[in-house]
Amino acid sequence: MARTQTITRPSKAIVPSASTSTSPYQLDPSQSLRAVKALIRKLQSPLENPTAASKTSLLADTDTQDATDAAPVWLVLTTKTHITDKKRLKPGKIALPHPYLLPTTLSTDAPREPLRICLITADPQREYKDLVAAPAFPAELGKQISRVIGTEKLKAKFSSFEAKRKLLSEHDVFLADDRIITLLPTLLGKVFYKATSKRLVPISLEGKRKSVDAETGLKRVKLADGGKKVEKLPLQAKDMAAEIQRALQAALVHLAPSTTTAVKIGIATQTPEQLQANLTAVVDGLAGKYIPQGWKNIRAIHLKGPDTVALPIWMADQLWLDETQILSDERMAAIEGGKGKKRKRIAELGADAVIEVPGPDGKMRRLEKPKPNGGEGKKSKRAKKGSVEESVVGMEEETGEVKATEREAKRKRQEALRAQKEALKSAVPVQAIAETPAAKVKVKKQRVKAADLM
């Protein structure tokens, strides 16, 4: 069936928006708000899991429970092509207007316990402990940081499985220096990385860069343009606190070589308006920074809870990214035809017909109809061995004269070989052949006697 080409146009779920984004593709606020309200109603309903309040699972892993103790809300975004070629261990961050880790974002008035934050830093760890205890560091945030660990202490004290499991259960949020974030999977293992509720959040614990050259007093020239290597100022307590606050107020983006990306945008205890604002911010951040070609590469956007179905809030009209990905009618017929139909098509074509079929590498290949042989019947055994002369003889009827000629030639070759062997035998003297072993024996005996005398 022929595939028609349609003009690219926005989906019905997209309306012009007054936001700062310049893209003509935008989420429909009413559609996203309806989906958020329906999902929250489902998550907060007692019929969602009627046995959860009365029975406790003995096999549940309490170490990997969410820090907020509330049902998370996930944004599932599907693209038309892969976002990246390899998996990245350092996640990206998108700022949320209503962070779900802060107690002020809850829709209920019930107070929440302060977070237990574990900070994993590069060595020496004493430098960062002093910054947390400094007067310039916010006291409220300093109370939430319960432990500061360096890499050397992490290797020595938390090498066993039980120690890692205890460390995971004692804290709600784990922050790590982005300079060592790629080394932590080897040090922490699957205890930390098998679940996504307590994944490590990368933060920058380096000082600010010097934008002015100290010698000239002018703006620093880049190293690629012939300037000097960048110099950084010592890390200050207020800069460290600001970096931690930004990490707690952001949504993490874990990119993988696939077409589906899930981002946690909030929890079920937040208001629908807050979740809608987070949803819009995350979608704009993904389309503007992480997805190649932006909205044109987005196929669908869904909203999902832990054990609920995915609610669609946006769907693309086209399943391909550009017109070059559309297959022609001939190529579609060749792909759908299979081997049997391909051979049948070749047989039905004329003698000089040529067709194109896709190969294993995806490229088109030309196939010509094989020409008929000069005769029928099976080839002889000599023809199968590859002899050109014997294959010609096998195709025709062998005559008596040809056989006689072959026998005569074979007899002459045998006589010539026999005469050559006799000539070689007569050329070597018999006496030389007989005396050679005796001479060798005498030499050996003489050497033995000399050795005995010594």
Image: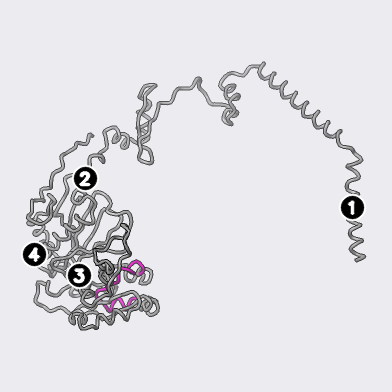
Circle 2 sits on which residue? 319
Q: Position of residue 402 (x, y in %)?
A: 66, 18
Range of magenta residues: 164-183
Circle 4 sits on which residue? 273
On the picture, is 185 further left or further right than 447?
Answer: left
On the picture, is 115 further left or further right than 16?
Answer: right
Nearest to the eye among marks 3 and 2: give it.
3
Circle 3 sits on which residue? 246
Q: Position of residue 88 (x, y in %)?
A: 31, 60
Q: Are marks 3 and 4 in contact (CB under 8 Å)?
A: no
Alpha-carbon span between mark 3 and mark 1: 96 Å
- Amino acid of disc 4: Glu
* Disc 4 secondary structure class: helix
The image's mark for residue 441 is: 1
- Amino acid of disc 3: Arg
Nearest to the eye among marks 3 and 1: give it.
3
- Amino acid of disc 2: Leu
